Image (cartoon, rainbow, N blue to C red):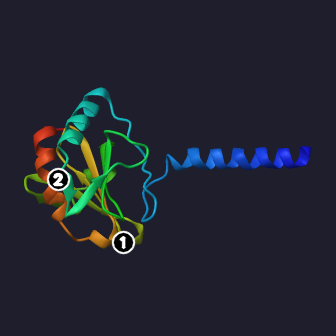
Amino acid sequence: MRIRRRAALIAVSAVACLSAAAVYATTSDTDETVAVPVPDAQVARYCAALHARLPQRVSGLPRHDLKPRSELTAGWGNPSIVLRCGVPRPAADNDSSADAVEVDGVGWLIEPQSGGTFRLTTTLRKAYVEVTLPKKYAGDVGPLTDLASAVKRTIPEGV
Protein backbone atom coordinates (compact mmCIF):
# COMPACT_ATOMS: atom_id res chain seq x y z
CA MET A 1 0.00 0.00 0.00
CA ARG A 2 2.75 2.49 0.94
CA ILE A 3 4.69 1.88 -2.25
CA ARG A 4 1.64 2.63 -4.39
CA ARG A 5 0.90 5.85 -2.47
CA ARG A 6 4.51 6.97 -2.76
CA ALA A 7 4.53 6.24 -6.49
CA ALA A 8 1.27 8.17 -6.90
CA LEU A 9 2.65 11.13 -4.94
CA ILE A 10 5.84 11.12 -6.99
CA ALA A 11 3.82 11.03 -10.22
CA VAL A 12 1.57 13.88 -9.06
CA SER A 13 4.60 15.93 -7.96
CA ALA A 14 6.31 15.34 -11.30
CA VAL A 15 3.22 16.48 -13.21
CA ALA A 16 2.95 19.60 -11.03
CA CYS A 17 6.61 20.46 -11.63
CA LEU A 18 6.29 19.95 -15.37
CA SER A 19 3.15 22.07 -15.47
CA ALA A 20 4.86 24.88 -13.60
CA ALA A 21 7.86 24.69 -15.92
CA ALA A 22 5.60 24.90 -18.97
CA VAL A 23 4.45 28.36 -17.89
CA TYR A 24 7.94 29.64 -18.66
CA ALA A 25 8.40 27.85 -21.98
CA THR A 26 8.52 29.62 -25.30
CA THR A 27 6.02 29.20 -28.06
CA SER A 28 6.36 26.37 -30.54
CA ASP A 29 4.06 25.18 -33.29
CA THR A 30 1.96 23.20 -30.81
CA ASP A 31 2.43 25.05 -27.52
CA GLU A 32 0.40 28.14 -26.63
CA THR A 33 2.58 29.00 -23.62
CA VAL A 34 4.96 31.97 -23.73
CA ALA A 35 7.39 33.63 -21.36
CA VAL A 36 5.79 36.83 -20.09
CA PRO A 37 8.17 39.82 -20.04
CA VAL A 38 8.75 41.70 -16.78
CA PRO A 39 9.06 45.38 -17.75
CA ASP A 40 9.28 48.42 -15.49
CA ALA A 41 6.07 50.27 -14.56
CA GLN A 42 6.19 52.85 -17.39
CA VAL A 43 6.82 50.23 -20.07
CA ALA A 44 4.02 48.09 -18.59
CA ARG A 45 1.64 51.07 -19.01
CA TYR A 46 2.62 51.40 -22.69
CA CYS A 47 2.09 47.66 -23.12
CA ALA A 48 -1.35 47.76 -21.46
CA ALA A 49 -2.36 50.54 -23.86
CA LEU A 50 -1.05 48.49 -26.79
CA HIS A 51 -2.92 45.40 -25.61
CA ALA A 52 -6.20 47.35 -25.61
CA ARG A 53 -5.59 48.50 -29.22
CA LEU A 54 -4.35 45.26 -30.73
CA PRO A 55 -6.39 44.11 -33.73
CA GLN A 56 -8.77 41.17 -33.47
CA ARG A 57 -7.26 39.78 -36.67
CA VAL A 58 -3.70 39.73 -37.98
CA SER A 59 -3.20 38.47 -41.54
CA GLY A 60 -6.82 37.33 -41.35
CA LEU A 61 -6.11 35.13 -38.31
CA PRO A 62 -8.23 35.45 -35.14
CA ARG A 63 -6.73 36.77 -31.94
CA HIS A 64 -6.50 34.56 -28.86
CA ASP A 65 -4.99 34.67 -25.40
CA LEU A 66 -1.81 32.80 -24.64
CA LYS A 67 -0.83 31.09 -21.40
CA PRO A 68 -0.36 32.55 -18.92
CA ARG A 69 -2.93 35.20 -19.76
CA SER A 70 -1.31 38.65 -19.71
CA GLU A 71 -1.66 42.19 -21.07
CA LEU A 72 1.92 41.74 -22.23
CA THR A 73 1.19 38.95 -24.72
CA ALA A 74 -1.21 38.08 -27.54
CA GLY A 75 -1.47 35.50 -30.28
CA TRP A 76 -3.15 35.04 -33.63
CA GLY A 77 -3.74 31.82 -35.57
CA ASN A 78 -2.30 28.33 -35.25
CA PRO A 79 0.63 28.05 -35.27
CA SER A 80 0.53 31.33 -33.40
CA ILE A 81 1.91 34.64 -34.45
CA VAL A 82 3.03 35.74 -30.97
CA LEU A 83 3.37 39.29 -29.69
CA ARG A 84 5.21 40.06 -26.44
CA CYS A 85 5.45 43.64 -25.20
CA GLY A 86 8.04 44.89 -22.73
CA VAL A 87 10.86 42.62 -23.82
CA PRO A 88 14.46 43.73 -23.20
CA ARG A 89 16.30 45.60 -25.92
CA PRO A 90 17.77 42.98 -28.26
CA ALA A 91 21.57 42.82 -28.44
CA ALA A 92 21.39 42.96 -32.24
CA ASP A 93 19.88 46.45 -31.89
CA ASN A 94 23.46 47.71 -31.36
CA ASP A 95 24.61 46.20 -34.67
CA SER A 96 24.37 48.72 -37.50
CA SER A 97 24.57 45.88 -40.03
CA ALA A 98 21.63 43.97 -38.50
CA ASP A 99 18.68 43.28 -40.78
CA ALA A 100 15.80 45.68 -40.23
CA VAL A 101 12.68 46.83 -42.02
CA GLU A 102 10.27 49.73 -41.62
CA VAL A 103 6.60 48.92 -42.04
CA ASP A 104 4.05 51.74 -41.94
CA GLY A 105 6.30 53.96 -39.81
CA VAL A 106 7.42 51.29 -37.34
CA GLY A 107 10.99 49.98 -37.45
CA TRP A 108 11.55 46.26 -36.83
CA LEU A 109 14.79 44.39 -36.22
CA ILE A 110 14.72 41.00 -38.00
CA GLU A 111 16.31 37.97 -36.34
CA PRO A 112 16.02 34.50 -37.92
CA GLN A 113 15.41 31.76 -35.35
CA SER A 114 15.71 28.00 -35.43
CA GLY A 115 13.14 26.04 -37.41
CA GLY A 116 12.54 28.80 -39.94
CA THR A 117 10.78 31.20 -37.55
CA PHE A 118 11.57 34.90 -37.31
CA ARG A 119 11.67 37.22 -34.32
CA LEU A 120 10.96 40.85 -35.13
CA THR A 121 11.46 43.52 -32.48
CA THR A 122 10.52 47.18 -32.68
CA THR A 123 13.30 49.75 -32.74
CA LEU A 124 13.42 53.34 -31.54
CA ARG A 125 10.35 53.05 -29.27
CA LYS A 126 9.96 53.61 -25.51
CA ALA A 127 8.94 49.94 -25.16
CA TYR A 128 10.19 47.01 -27.18
CA VAL A 129 7.55 44.87 -28.88
CA GLU A 130 8.55 41.43 -30.13
CA VAL A 131 6.61 39.51 -32.76
CA THR A 132 7.49 35.90 -33.51
CA LEU A 133 6.41 34.68 -36.92
CA PRO A 134 6.19 30.91 -37.36
CA LYS A 135 7.82 29.46 -40.48
CA LYS A 136 4.40 29.38 -42.14
CA TYR A 137 4.30 33.22 -42.12
CA ALA A 138 8.03 33.95 -42.58
CA GLY A 139 8.66 36.62 -45.16
CA ASP A 140 5.13 38.02 -44.84
CA VAL A 141 4.98 41.66 -43.69
CA GLY A 142 1.18 41.44 -43.39
CA PRO A 143 1.33 40.85 -39.62
CA LEU A 144 3.57 43.89 -39.15
CA THR A 145 1.26 46.00 -41.30
CA ASP A 146 -1.71 44.94 -39.17
CA LEU A 147 0.15 45.76 -35.92
CA ALA A 148 1.82 49.03 -36.96
CA SER A 149 -1.13 51.32 -36.22
CA ALA A 150 -1.56 50.03 -32.66
CA VAL A 151 2.18 50.29 -31.97
CA LYS A 152 2.37 53.87 -33.33
CA ARG A 153 -0.65 55.00 -31.29
CA THR A 154 0.43 53.54 -27.95
CA ILE A 155 4.22 53.35 -27.77
CA PRO A 156 6.02 56.65 -28.27
CA GLU A 157 9.15 56.94 -30.37
CA GLY A 158 12.45 57.31 -28.54
CA VAL A 159 14.87 55.23 -26.55
Locate the C terminus by quadrant.
Answer: top left
Picture mark count: 2
Label 2 or label 1, whichever comes before in sequence order: 1
Q: Determine crowd level at label 1: few under 14, some 14-19, many 20+ residues with C-alpha closer than 10 A.
A: few
Left or right of 84 in this view: 148 = left
The residue to which callout 1 is attached is: 116
Residue 89 locus on image (x, y percent) = 30, 45
Q: Position of residue 93 (x, y in %)?
A: 26, 51
Q: Residues within 10 Å of mark 2 (few under 14, many from 20)?
A: many
The label on residue 147 is 2
Residue type, numbered disc 1: Gly
Task: Identify which residue is drawn at 35% across, 67% down.
Answer: 117
Whole-angstrom CA distance, mark 2 to mark 1, is 21 Å
Residue 156: numbered disc: none
Residue at point 15%, 38% (across, down)? 154
Residue 55 placement (x, y as % from top left) = 18, 50
Q: Quadrant of residue 153?
A: top left
> Image height check: is 82 above or below 159?
below
Residue sitting farthest toward the top = 41
Q: Nearer the viewer, residue 58 or 147?
A: 58
Could you tell whether 75 is left or right of 33 in the image?
left
Left or right: 93 with respect to 145?
right
**Residue 89 visible, this orientation:** no
Q: Amino acid at mark 2?
A: Leu
Depth check: 137 or 53 in front?
53
Hey, which residue is sitting farthest front in the picture?
1
Query: Left or right: 44 with respect to 146?
Result: right
